[in-house]
Image: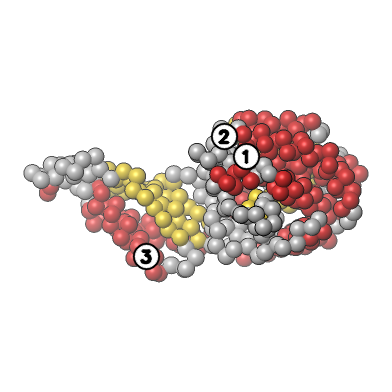
Amino acid sequence: MDTKKFFELYEPLHEELATLSKYICENPELGHQEFKACAAHAELLKKHGFDVEVGYLGLPTAFRATYDSGKPGPTICYLAEYDALPEIGHGCGHNILGTVSTGSGILLSKFVDEVGGRVVIGGTPAEETSGGKVTFAENGAFDDIDAVLISHPMDEDLESGTSLALEPLQFTFLGKPSHAAAAPEQGINALDACLATFHNINALREHVKDTTRIHGIVKEGGLAANIVPERAVAQFYVRTTKKAYLKEVVEKVINCAKAGALAAGAKLEISHFELGYDDLLTNTTLQERLSKNLNEVGITNIKKAHAISGSSDVGNVSYVCPTVHNDYNIFAEGEQTYPPHTREFRDATLRPAALEAMRKNVVAQAMTGLNLILEPELLNAVKSEFQQATADTK
Ligand SMILES: [Zn+2]
Ligand SMILES: [Zn+2]
């Protein structure tokens, strides 16, 4: 593949993309409130001939942008995120993340008039909280998509790996208030039910797979020490490496709460305080081609993904469409690096090394999109791996 042509077509975009990333970094917005970021992406995509639907699937800050060659061919999708964190703004670098996706789509669109196919950019809000990609995946947004690519800024170059499936569980224990000293026998202690749940879960830890994570807090634990607590609320994130195993663990965790409630004589209400995420099924065929293209543009030190990471709503996408979610280093060689969710990481997203990483990653992602359009055998291999991987999880 002629990388020179990609870089030539990229260069006029570079300033626009750098400006978009900087603007979003300087105007951080929390999940589902990313009105400025969403509008800025939409404006740039419209300028480059995309049809843009802002406010997609009932999510006001989601968008779907399409560039259709009008000729038959596959549909390649890049996913943009643009939500920030409280206090530290774009500490996760979603300003540059979204910009790389939008840039990759625009660059690929410069080829499809000739070769056919379509390019779609999904603007997916609120990755850090209640992920927009879950709504996308559950409502058929990927039904007409052949492959999904998304890259996250990081402090090293990593292949797409896996992420933990997650279920956010809330337990509300309801007891009966009474004078804690004068008539404790007439009260039902909801806090006891809650604390017993934590003990039960701590015992459960020894009997679940090593890759399981169960972590929780007490949100409400009573109002005054001299009143038997009438109401207690605990929230837990339950995570495992596989969606199917998560179900088993969640059932056990719920039993821990039921046992706690039973012991105290309290009632138990079970709910979800956020959306659950599936684990990430990386399409390795797609990753291999992406890595080859990254090597060609000069990113060579790409490491295997870490065995355990957090959770992401990209997981839900990977169960409905072939997906890669790799990471790219935004720091200069020899420079002190910082992990995401820090102010230092946020500031690094605007520096020359990050902009150079943006240039190379946009080119490699657009090249991979063009590979999928031009090589039916590659796309078939990607799809059969996807079918196998999703069948294995059932
Ligand atoms: Zn992130
Ligand atoms: Zn993050």
Q: How is the image coloured?
A: secondary structure
Mark 3 residue's CB less than 8 Å from ligand 2: no
Residue type at tag 1: Tyr
Q: Secondary structure at mark 2?
A: loop
Residue at x-position 42% and y-position 58%: 214
Residue extending furthest left?
Answer: 182
- Looking at the image, which is closer to me, 168 or 73? 168
Provide the residue designation for mark 1. Answer: 82
Q: Quadrant of residue 221?
A: top left
Q: First in sequence: mark 2 or mark 1?
A: 2
Provide the residue designation for mark 2. Answer: 29
Residue type at tag 2: Glu
Up-down: is 136 above or below 364? above
Disc 1 from disc 3: Cα separation: 38 Å
Does residue 164 appear in the picture of this structure? Answer: yes
Give the crowd class for mark 3: few <14, some 14-19, many >=20 residues within 10 Å.
some
| Apparent side of residue 171 relative to residue 278 in the rendered image (left or right) | left
Point out the image quarter for the N terminus. Answer: bottom right
* Percent of width and height locating residue 17: 74, 38
Provide the residue designation for mark 3. Answer: 204
* Percent of width and height locating residue 167: 48, 52
